[in-house]
Image (cartoon, rainbow, N blue to C red):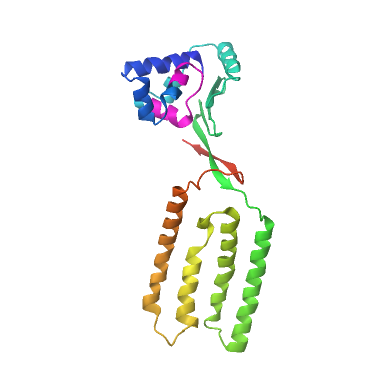
Amino acid sequence: MTIEIADKLVKLRKKYGYSQEELANKLGISRQAVSKWERAEASPDTDNLICLAKLYGVSLDELLATDADLDTIIKEQVKDKDKDNDGKIIIDEAGVHITDEDGSSLVINNKGVHRKTMRKVRKSRLGIFNDMFEGVLFLVAAVTYILLGSLLDMWRNGWVVFFLPEIICSTVRAIDKKNPRNFNMPFLATFTFFFVCMVYPGFDTPLWHPMWVVFLAIPVYYSLVSAIRKGIGAEKLTEDEEFEEVEDKK
Protein backbone atom coordinates (compact mmCIF):
# COMPACT_ATOMS: atom_id res chain seq x y z
CA MET A 1 0.00 0.00 0.00
CA THR A 2 1.49 3.36 -1.05
CA ILE A 3 1.17 6.52 1.03
CA GLU A 4 -0.63 8.21 -1.86
CA ILE A 5 -3.33 5.53 -2.02
CA ALA A 6 -3.65 5.59 1.76
CA ASP A 7 -4.16 9.38 1.65
CA LYS A 8 -6.74 8.93 -1.08
CA LEU A 9 -8.69 6.49 1.12
CA VAL A 10 -8.67 9.08 3.93
CA LYS A 11 -9.90 11.85 1.62
CA LEU A 12 -12.66 9.69 0.13
CA ARG A 13 -13.84 8.61 3.58
CA LYS A 14 -13.99 12.20 4.80
CA LYS A 15 -15.59 13.37 1.56
CA TYR A 16 -18.50 11.02 2.11
CA GLY A 17 -18.73 11.89 5.79
CA TYR A 18 -17.78 8.52 7.27
CA SER A 19 -15.86 8.04 10.46
CA GLN A 20 -13.45 5.10 10.62
CA GLU A 21 -15.98 3.29 12.81
CA GLU A 22 -18.85 3.90 10.35
CA LEU A 23 -16.80 2.76 7.37
CA ALA A 24 -15.69 -0.35 9.26
CA ASN A 25 -19.31 -1.21 10.06
CA LYS A 26 -20.32 -0.84 6.41
CA LEU A 27 -17.52 -3.18 5.33
CA GLY A 28 -17.99 -5.61 8.22
CA ILE A 29 -14.44 -5.19 9.50
CA SER A 30 -12.75 -3.65 12.54
CA ARG A 31 -11.95 0.04 12.92
CA GLN A 32 -8.32 -0.93 13.45
CA ALA A 33 -8.21 -2.42 9.94
CA VAL A 34 -9.41 0.86 8.42
CA SER A 35 -6.86 2.75 10.50
CA LYS A 36 -4.04 0.51 9.21
CA TRP A 37 -5.11 1.14 5.60
CA GLU A 38 -5.05 4.88 6.10
CA ARG A 39 -1.60 4.73 7.71
CA ALA A 40 -0.34 2.55 4.82
CA GLU A 41 0.47 -0.23 7.29
CA ALA A 42 -1.82 -2.72 5.56
CA SER A 43 -3.69 -3.12 2.30
CA PRO A 44 -7.41 -3.84 1.81
CA ASP A 45 -8.06 -7.28 0.41
CA THR A 46 -9.68 -7.76 -2.99
CA ASP A 47 -13.26 -7.90 -1.73
CA ASN A 48 -12.85 -4.79 0.41
CA LEU A 49 -11.30 -2.86 -2.47
CA ILE A 50 -14.30 -3.71 -4.63
CA CYS A 51 -16.66 -2.66 -1.82
CA LEU A 52 -14.78 0.62 -1.34
CA ALA A 53 -14.95 1.38 -5.05
CA LYS A 54 -18.71 0.77 -5.09
CA LEU A 55 -19.24 2.74 -1.88
CA TYR A 56 -17.38 5.77 -3.21
CA GLY A 57 -18.75 5.47 -6.74
CA VAL A 58 -15.37 5.11 -8.42
CA SER A 59 -13.70 2.41 -10.48
CA LEU A 60 -10.87 0.27 -9.16
CA ASP A 61 -8.54 2.05 -11.58
CA GLU A 62 -9.49 5.42 -10.11
CA LEU A 63 -9.24 4.13 -6.55
CA LEU A 64 -5.75 2.73 -7.07
CA ALA A 65 -4.40 5.33 -9.49
CA THR A 66 -1.24 7.09 -8.32
CA ASP A 67 0.97 9.88 -9.63
CA ALA A 68 4.07 8.61 -7.88
CA ASP A 69 6.92 7.42 -10.09
CA LEU A 70 7.75 3.74 -10.28
CA ASP A 71 10.97 4.04 -8.20
CA THR A 72 9.07 5.66 -5.33
CA ILE A 73 6.39 2.97 -5.40
CA ILE A 74 8.97 0.17 -5.38
CA LYS A 75 10.82 1.74 -2.44
CA GLU A 76 7.60 1.96 -0.43
CA GLN A 77 6.73 -1.65 -1.26
CA VAL A 78 10.18 -2.85 -0.17
CA LYS A 79 9.84 -0.81 3.00
CA ASP A 80 6.47 -2.41 3.75
CA LYS A 81 7.73 -5.98 3.37
CA ASP A 82 8.79 -6.13 7.01
CA LYS A 83 5.37 -4.97 8.22
CA ASP A 84 2.71 -7.36 9.42
CA ASN A 85 -0.20 -6.79 7.05
CA ASP A 86 -3.19 -8.61 5.66
CA GLY A 87 -2.31 -8.31 1.97
CA LYS A 88 -0.40 -6.19 -0.51
CA ILE A 89 -0.78 -3.99 -3.56
CA ILE A 90 1.96 -3.96 -6.18
CA ILE A 91 2.00 -1.38 -8.98
CA ASP A 92 4.43 -1.85 -11.86
CA GLU A 93 4.62 -1.71 -15.65
CA ALA A 94 2.40 -4.80 -15.92
CA GLY A 95 -0.46 -3.17 -14.00
CA VAL A 96 -1.89 -3.21 -10.51
CA HIS A 97 -1.58 -6.48 -8.55
CA ILE A 98 -3.63 -6.90 -5.36
CA THR A 99 -3.08 -9.96 -3.17
CA ASP A 100 -5.08 -11.11 -0.14
CA GLU A 101 -3.65 -12.94 2.86
CA ASP A 102 -5.22 -16.18 1.57
CA GLY A 103 -3.46 -15.94 -1.79
CA SER A 104 -6.41 -14.58 -3.80
CA SER A 105 -5.41 -11.84 -6.20
CA LEU A 106 -6.78 -9.17 -8.51
CA VAL A 107 -4.83 -7.92 -11.53
CA ILE A 108 -5.82 -4.71 -13.33
CA ASN A 109 -4.07 -3.82 -16.57
CA ASN A 110 -4.79 -2.75 -20.14
CA LYS A 111 -6.19 -6.21 -20.87
CA GLY A 112 -8.93 -5.85 -18.28
CA VAL A 113 -9.58 -7.07 -14.75
CA HIS A 114 -8.54 -10.61 -13.84
CA ARG A 115 -9.42 -12.17 -10.51
CA LYS A 116 -7.90 -15.32 -9.03
CA THR A 117 -9.46 -16.90 -5.97
CA MET A 118 -8.31 -19.75 -3.75
CA ARG A 119 -10.80 -22.42 -2.84
CA LYS A 120 -10.44 -25.16 -0.29
CA VAL A 121 -9.91 -28.70 -1.50
CA ARG A 122 -9.23 -31.57 0.87
CA LYS A 123 -6.46 -33.87 -0.28
CA SER A 124 -7.36 -37.53 -0.53
CA ARG A 125 -5.12 -39.94 1.33
CA LEU A 126 -6.29 -42.85 -0.82
CA GLY A 127 -4.98 -41.73 -4.18
CA ILE A 128 -5.01 -44.38 -6.91
CA PHE A 129 -6.11 -47.01 -4.37
CA ASN A 130 -9.64 -45.59 -4.51
CA ASP A 131 -9.86 -46.11 -8.30
CA MET A 132 -8.50 -49.65 -8.02
CA PHE A 133 -10.90 -50.44 -5.18
CA GLU A 134 -13.85 -49.16 -7.21
CA GLY A 135 -12.80 -51.24 -10.22
CA VAL A 136 -12.57 -54.40 -8.10
CA LEU A 137 -16.01 -53.74 -6.61
CA PHE A 138 -17.59 -53.36 -10.05
CA LEU A 139 -15.96 -56.62 -11.13
CA VAL A 140 -17.37 -58.35 -8.04
CA ALA A 141 -20.79 -56.83 -8.79
CA ALA A 142 -20.68 -58.18 -12.36
CA VAL A 143 -19.76 -61.68 -11.17
CA THR A 144 -22.48 -61.51 -8.51
CA TYR A 145 -25.09 -60.50 -11.08
CA ILE A 146 -24.14 -63.41 -13.34
CA LEU A 147 -24.34 -65.85 -10.42
CA LEU A 148 -27.71 -64.49 -9.27
CA GLY A 149 -29.04 -64.76 -12.79
CA SER A 150 -27.66 -68.24 -13.41
CA LEU A 151 -28.48 -69.81 -10.04
CA LEU A 152 -31.59 -67.92 -8.92
CA ASP A 153 -32.96 -66.66 -12.25
CA MET A 154 -32.63 -63.05 -11.08
CA TRP A 155 -31.79 -61.57 -14.46
CA ARG A 156 -34.69 -59.10 -14.19
CA ASN A 157 -33.85 -57.69 -10.80
CA GLY A 158 -30.35 -58.82 -9.87
CA TRP A 159 -28.82 -55.83 -11.64
CA VAL A 160 -29.45 -53.71 -8.53
CA VAL A 161 -26.09 -54.99 -7.23
CA PHE A 162 -24.40 -52.51 -9.59
CA PHE A 163 -25.46 -49.69 -7.27
CA LEU A 164 -23.40 -51.14 -4.43
CA PRO A 165 -19.85 -50.32 -5.67
CA GLU A 166 -20.56 -46.60 -5.87
CA ILE A 167 -22.39 -46.61 -2.53
CA ILE A 168 -19.42 -48.32 -0.85
CA CYS A 169 -16.83 -46.10 -2.58
CA SER A 170 -18.69 -42.90 -1.75
CA THR A 171 -18.80 -44.02 1.89
CA VAL A 172 -15.01 -44.49 1.81
CA ARG A 173 -14.55 -41.06 0.17
CA ALA A 174 -16.76 -39.40 2.78
CA ILE A 175 -14.73 -40.96 5.59
CA ASP A 176 -11.41 -40.20 3.90
CA LYS A 177 -12.27 -36.52 3.31
CA LYS A 178 -14.20 -36.23 6.58
CA ASN A 179 -17.09 -34.75 4.63
CA PRO A 180 -20.49 -36.53 4.57
CA ARG A 181 -21.43 -34.57 1.45
CA ASN A 182 -19.16 -36.89 -0.52
CA PHE A 183 -21.54 -39.76 0.21
CA ASN A 184 -23.70 -40.61 -2.83
CA MET A 185 -27.18 -40.40 -1.31
CA PRO A 186 -28.97 -40.50 -4.73
CA PHE A 187 -27.45 -43.94 -5.39
CA LEU A 188 -28.48 -45.23 -1.96
CA ALA A 189 -32.03 -43.94 -2.38
CA THR A 190 -32.34 -45.46 -5.86
CA PHE A 191 -30.88 -48.79 -4.70
CA THR A 192 -33.32 -48.89 -1.77
CA PHE A 193 -36.26 -48.11 -4.05
CA PHE A 194 -35.51 -50.85 -6.59
CA PHE A 195 -34.40 -53.39 -3.99
CA VAL A 196 -37.68 -53.15 -2.07
CA CYS A 197 -39.85 -53.00 -5.19
CA MET A 198 -38.05 -55.64 -7.26
CA VAL A 199 -36.08 -57.92 -4.92
CA TYR A 200 -37.53 -58.05 -1.42
CA PRO A 201 -40.47 -58.15 -0.87
CA GLY A 202 -40.33 -57.91 -4.68
CA PHE A 203 -42.78 -57.80 -7.59
CA ASP A 204 -45.54 -59.57 -5.68
CA THR A 205 -45.91 -56.65 -3.27
CA PRO A 206 -47.24 -53.40 -4.81
CA LEU A 207 -44.83 -51.00 -3.15
CA TRP A 208 -43.95 -48.82 -6.12
CA HIS A 209 -46.22 -45.99 -5.02
CA PRO A 210 -45.28 -45.56 -1.35
CA MET A 211 -41.59 -46.28 -1.91
CA TRP A 212 -41.03 -43.16 -4.02
CA VAL A 213 -40.81 -41.21 -0.75
CA VAL A 214 -37.25 -42.52 -0.27
CA PHE A 215 -36.12 -40.00 -2.88
CA LEU A 216 -37.14 -37.20 -0.53
CA ALA A 217 -34.25 -38.29 1.66
CA ILE A 218 -31.78 -36.90 -0.91
CA PRO A 219 -32.40 -33.14 -0.40
CA VAL A 220 -33.07 -33.67 3.30
CA TYR A 221 -29.72 -35.44 3.77
CA TYR A 222 -27.59 -32.83 1.99
CA SER A 223 -29.43 -29.93 3.65
CA LEU A 224 -28.88 -31.40 7.10
CA VAL A 225 -25.22 -32.16 6.40
CA SER A 226 -24.57 -28.61 5.17
CA ALA A 227 -26.37 -27.08 8.15
CA ILE A 228 -24.50 -29.25 10.65
CA ARG A 229 -21.09 -28.61 9.04
CA LYS A 230 -21.67 -24.86 9.06
CA GLY A 231 -22.87 -25.05 12.64
CA ILE A 232 -19.73 -26.78 13.88
CA GLY A 233 -17.41 -24.76 11.65
CA ALA A 234 -16.30 -27.78 9.63
CA GLU A 235 -15.97 -25.64 6.48
CA LYS A 236 -12.73 -24.13 7.81
CA LEU A 237 -9.45 -25.20 6.29
CA THR A 238 -7.66 -27.97 8.20
CA GLU A 239 -4.15 -29.35 8.02
CA ASP A 240 -5.30 -32.04 5.60
CA GLU A 241 -6.57 -29.52 3.05
CA GLU A 242 -4.83 -27.67 0.27
CA PHE A 243 -5.64 -24.62 -1.83
CA GLU A 244 -6.66 -24.84 -5.46
CA GLU A 245 -6.37 -21.73 -7.60
CA VAL A 246 -9.31 -20.70 -9.76
CA GLU A 247 -9.17 -17.78 -12.16
CA ASP A 248 -12.26 -15.73 -12.90
CA LYS A 249 -11.88 -13.32 -15.80
CA LYS A 250 -14.20 -10.32 -15.83
Up/down of 163 relative to 124, above or below: below
- Per the rendered image, the range of residues in magenta is 35-53
**Which of the 4 image quadrants contains residue 99?**
top right
Residue 196 coordinates in the image, percent (x, y): 46, 79
Residue at x 48% of width, y 73% of height: 192
Q: Nearer the viewer, residue 59 or 171?
A: 171
Left or right: residue 250 compared with residue 244: left
Residue at x 41% of width, y 70% of height: 214
Residue at x 66% of width, y 64% of height: 133
Residue 115 coordinates in the image, percent (x, y): 50, 34
Magenta run includes residue 197: no
Residue at x 35% of width, y 29% of height: 26
Q: Residue furthest left?
A: 17
Up/down of 205 relative to 17, above or below: below
Q: Residue furthest front?
A: 232
Is residue 171 visible to us here? yes
Up/down of 43 relative to 193, above or below: above
Is residue 56 visible to us here? no
Most common secondary structure along the magenta stretch = helix
Total marks placed: 0
**Which of the 4 image quadrants contains residue 31?**
top left
Residue 54 coordinates in the image, percent (x, y): 37, 28
Residue 90 coordinates in the image, percent (x, y): 55, 22
Left or right: residue 131 compared with residue 86: right
